[in-house]
Image (cartoon, rainbow, N blue to C red):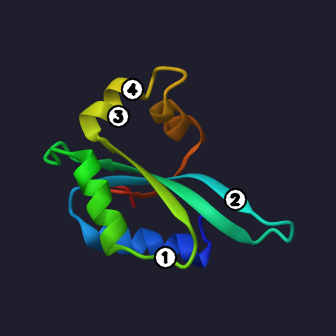
Amino acid sequence: MKDNKYIKAMTEKLIGYSDSIETIYLVSVKVDTLGELTSFKLGLIVDDTVKSTSEFIAKLYIDIDCELPYDIIVYTQSEFDSLKDDNGTFANKIISKGTVLYGKGLS
């Protein structure tokens, strides 16, 4: 599903949106009975220079549009690192079930 045109377009928009984005994960998708994508959820890991993830995500929702409904969860790198190994956290779900769409330093 990571090759879906809507997900690819959103990933490209996010990469161009902010240099603070370290990693983008595809966390989940919803499809209709025909297998067509109807919505998706992304997890963003941003560097620790982002002081307020809630302000970052609010601005992101205002500035970036998509033809399909989408949801984004944002963690700073230090928040993500402290939570990713704890079962039951959403950060753990991202790391265990998510698919990396973009990562600084990844080829």
Label 2 crowding class (10 Å Cα cut-off): few <14, some 14-19, many 20+? few
Residue at 36% across, 52% down: 23
User: Based on the displayed image, in which of its 4 quarters is residue 93 positioned?
Assistant: top right
Residue type marked 4: Leu
Residue type marked 3: Phe
- The residue mark sitting in front, 2 or 4, is 2
User: Mark 2 near mark 3, Cβ–Cβ under 8 Å?
Assistant: no
Point out the image quarter for the N terminus. bottom right
Tag 4 residue: 83
78 in relation to 46, above or below: above
In the rendering, which numbered label is found on residue 16? none
Count the marks: 4
User: Mark 1 near mark 4, Cβ–Cβ under 8 Å?
Assistant: no
Q: CA–CA distance between discs 1 and 4?
A: 29 Å
- The residue mark sitting in front, 2 or 3, is 2
- The residue mark sitting in front, 1 or 3, is 1
In the shown orientation, is residue 27 left or right of residue 13? right
| Residue 84, x across and y down, in percent | 43, 29
Query: Which is nearer the N-term, disc 2 or disc 3?
Result: 2
Query: Which is nearer the N-term, disc 1 or disc 2?
Result: 2
Q: Residue furthest top?
A: 86
Residue type marked 1: Cys
In the rendering, which numbered label is found on residue 80? 3
| Residue 16, x across and y down, in percent | 29, 73
Disc 1, SS? loop
Residue at 50% across, 37% down: 95
Query: Which is nearer the N-term, disc 2 or disc 4?
Result: 2
In the rendering, which numbered label is found on residue 66? 1
User: Mark 3 near mark 4, Cβ–Cβ under 8 Å?
Assistant: yes
Residue type marked 2: Lys
Query: Which is nearer the N-term, disc 1 or disc 4?
Result: 1
Tag 2 residue: 30
